[in-house]
Image (cartoon, grey):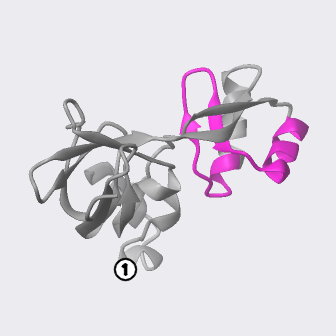
Amino acid sequence: MTDTVRACAIETGGAAGAADVVVLSWEDRWRRRGRLVTEGGASIMLDLAEARELRDGDALLLQDGRRVAVRAASEPLTEVRGGDAAHMARLAWHLGNRHLPVQIEAERLLIRRDHVLEDMLARLGARLAPVEAAFRPEGGAYGHGRTHAHAHAPHADDDPDAHLREALHE
């Protein structure tokens, strides 16, 4: 194993031609600091100014000038399908109402496996199938990368239309 090299920046979409690859789950792709190990066995100390999402296809810029590609890991997910567009919207609403990360695609939704949610969805008439895939859920509605980590403006409780105005100005 080699010495640990610091990564202090991210190049969005810069994975092409990278010297090595780090494969991370969805949870592990939201980072500020931490030790990462590449597929080649290199040790990297991620040291960003603020927490941010490391996206599939990004590159970590190392202090020694090399780039390391970020790849989304394959994870155990549940594929959710409905009967028609209205049924899919209803299923998505129930998941969103629970503030769950959901990957939205044209013909299906993907969620992390959870037997309680799967039971709820089956009772709502969803067709479910276990799949292994990279998880890339929808980002937050307020310009943040994670739905479970969003913060509202301080005035939101005083003004019921504040969220709507903020969304229209983003």
Q: Position of residue 6 (x, y in %)?
A: 21, 64
Confirm whether residue 168 shows in the render.
Answer: yes
Q: Position of residue 66 (x, y in %)?
A: 14, 47
Q: Nearer the viewer, residue 104 or 74?
A: 74
Q: Quadrant of residue 7?
A: bottom left
- Provide the secondary structure element on which disc 1 rests: helix
Rendering quarter of residue 34:
bottom left
Q: Residue at x 61, y 41 (%)?
A: 75
User: In the image shown, does 99 or 71 lie closer to the viewer?
Assistant: 71
Give coordinates of residue 142: x percent, y percent. 38, 57
* Residue 120 part of the magenta segment: yes
Magenta segment = 95-124
Report the side of 118 relative to 137 (left or right).
Answer: right
Residue occupied by mark 1: 154
Q: Is residue 31 magenta?
A: no
Q: Position of residue 42 (x, y in %)?
A: 32, 53
The answer to whether 6 appears left or right of 137 in the picture is left
Q: In the rendered view of the protein, which quadrant contains the N terminus?
A: bottom left
